[in-house]
Amino acid sequence: MQRLLAGAGFEIHSELRPRAVDDPVITAYKRDIDRTLLRENLSRTAEERVRALQALSQLADEAQRAGRRLRRER
Amino acid sequence: MTDFAKLLRALNKGHVECIVIGGLAATIHGSARLTQDVDVCYARTPENLDRLVAALKPLKPYLRGAPPGLPFEWSAATLSRGLNFTLTTSAGAIDILGEVTGGGDYDALLPHTVIARLFGYDVKCLDLEWLIMTKRAAGRPRDIEVIAELEALREERS
């Protein structure tokens, strides 16, 4: 097989990878994933995804600061 | 708050050999989860340690969570004495890892990367398959939801 492939200009590359297993816990969690969000993200470019993350991070930061301010004022 | 663009630009402008892993890699692949830091696996050659030190130096890296005033020298010598560092910088949090559980070092991960075009640079990012594998290998309970989402992404892409 190796000789045949070499003759055709190819070589076999092999690597060890853990066998993908169906984890029932992961499968259970997968049911709750909002796939509409994933599809929306997949329609974006990688840079748009990172920019959206940045905006989300900013929002989370502002919400945390607002929460801290509120607790101080009580 | 972490400025993802600023950190990625610093690493790329400094020609640092590194691979984006972790939550930011998940975002690049389409994850909808919020991550607060940049995780990279870096090559531990002496030249690359110098590049990494020079690239992040303007951002004043310091050990994250360490009490202020603790003596910490951001240098290639410091990096060569350690392996994985969790840092805070003026652009936010960055974890630099010499090795990734279940994935190995930079050279081992390199064949399993994809190139993402970000902010004008080609950024090496761990591919989805290996991202799932390393998350599984880490075995952290908090990663269960992450793995579920990454597997859902894989199904959506196929």
Image (cartoon, coloured by chain):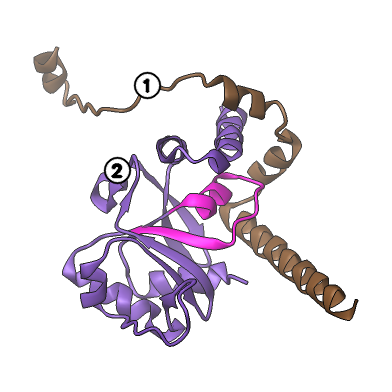
Chain colours: A brown, B purple
Residue B90 point in image, percent of width and height: 52, 81
The chain letter for the residue carrying disc 1 is A
Question: Which residue, given by chain and number where applicable, does mark 1 sit on?
Answer: A19
Q: Residue B64 versus residue A53: which sits nearer the camera?
A: B64
Mark 2, Cα crowd under 10 Å, few <14 / some 14-19 / many 20+, is few
- For image coordinates 47% across by 53% down, the residue present is B116
Please, what is the three-letter code of the amino acid marked with disc 2? Answer: Pro
* Left or right for B11, reference B141: left
Residue B60 point in image, percent of width and height: 43, 84
Tell me whether marks 1 and 2 sit on the same chain: no
Q: Is residue B50 magenta?
A: no
Residue A60 point in image, percent of width and height: 73, 64
Mark 1, Cα crowd under 10 Å, few <14 / some 14-19 / many 20+, is few
Q: Place residue B12 in its image quadrant.
A: bottom left
Q: Which residues are magenta?
A: B21-41
**Spatial separation of the CA atoms under disc 1 and disc 2:** 18 Å
Q: Residue B71 versus residue A10: which sits nearer the camera?
A: B71
Question: Which residue, given by chain and number where applicable, does mark 2 sit on?
Answer: B111
- Relative to B105, is A31 above or below? above
Residue that protrudes farthest toward the right in the picture: A74
Q: Place residue B19 in its image quadrant.
A: bottom left
- Relative to B135, is A4 above or below? above
Q: Is residue B31 magenta?
A: yes
Residue that protrudes farthest toward the left in the picture: A3
Please, what is the three-letter code of the amino acid marked with disc 1? Answer: Arg
Q: Residue A48 versus residue B10: which sits nearer the camera?
A: B10
